[in-house]
Amino acid sequence: MKFEFRDSKIGSLFGFTDDIKKNENLFSGRSGNISILWNRNKDAIAVEIDGLSIQLLPDQLVTTTYLQHVSYKNTVLPLTAFLFNREFYCINDHDSEVSCNGILFFGTQDLPIITIPKAQQRKFNTLYEVFEDEFSTPDKIQGDMLQMLLKRLIIICTRLAKEQHIVKALDNEQIDIIRKFNVLVDTHYKTKRKVGDYAELLFKSPKTLSNLFAIYNQKSPQQIILERLVLEAKRLITFSDKQNQEIAHELGFNDPAHFSRFFKKMTGRSPSQYRMLETISV
């Protein structure tokens, strides 16, 4: 099963399938999409994201963006997927409506895997059926209806992500600071590498950010910035043909040797060693 809504005038795309591995190449647009992947099977499913193999348990979801490299080569069972591009529903423009940036999409420090509680499984299954029904009713407002359904899905997932991934000690204002920090790091990590840079953008002190993240998780704001930088380095080494010197320049390092030292300090291997191991594993 594969459904697609597309508005060629503005280039918007929304896709829905019960088997993304089978139907991935059948959608009109493959680049620039955000996805919500949902394991509706009774067994776990393997998905590879940025070269890391993860196991999605039954009734678990994970979100991915166009910044990530997703592979279904080891995915055996059908995997349900909702995918959309910025033209269909812009996460940034609608963040005030759904408050998902930095939690579900963009700037999240770990893969946002969400477990659907038993008490909410009926709600998700009903929403799945409503998506199916809407695709059987093509009319002038179908795009608006699909946007409304997608927004509801994102809001429900965001609520669960907050419950499952954010400690109860944080209030909404503190959560909002964390979200904004995560998104800012995702936007500026190539040029801003000090906590003070982001504290200034958030009109907070570096100490306030450090204290907040000490409650949120075990990673400091500085660690989050550096890990985002090394993540992009890994992506470029693994999924592009760029050489180490080019990658160093793209990531804002004036000296390739400085980049090599940074990468080895963060990963335990030089960029060349990491590249060789990735080549062997493929």
Image (cartoon, grey):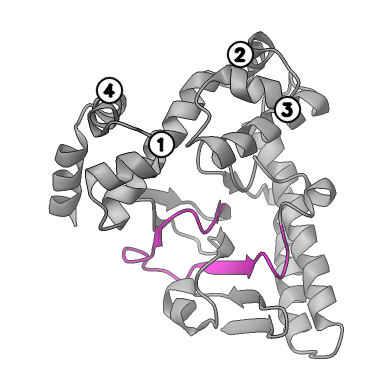
Q: Which residue position is annotated with label 3?
A: 177
- Give the structural element (helix, strand or loop) at label 1: loop
Q: Which residue position is annotated with label 2?
A: 210
> If you read the primary sequence from the N terminus, does the residue marked by circle 3 or circle 4 appear first?
3
Q: Which residue position is annotated with label 4?
A: 265
Please state which amino acid type lies under the numbered disc 3.
Ile
Q: CA distance from mark 1 to mark 2?
A: 25 Å
Closest to the observer, 137 or 261:
261
Splitting the image into 4 quarters, where does residue 150 fall? bottom right
Q: Residue 71, percent across and down?
A: 37, 62
Q: Which residue position is annotated with label 1?
A: 252
Q: CA distance from mark 2 to mark 3?
A: 12 Å
Q: Which residues are magenta?
A: 62-90
> If you read the primary sequence from the N terminus, does the residue marked by circle 4 or circle 1 appear first?
1
Residues tagged 2 and 3 counted as in contact (Cβ below 8 A): no
Does residue 180 sit above or below 2 in this rendering? above
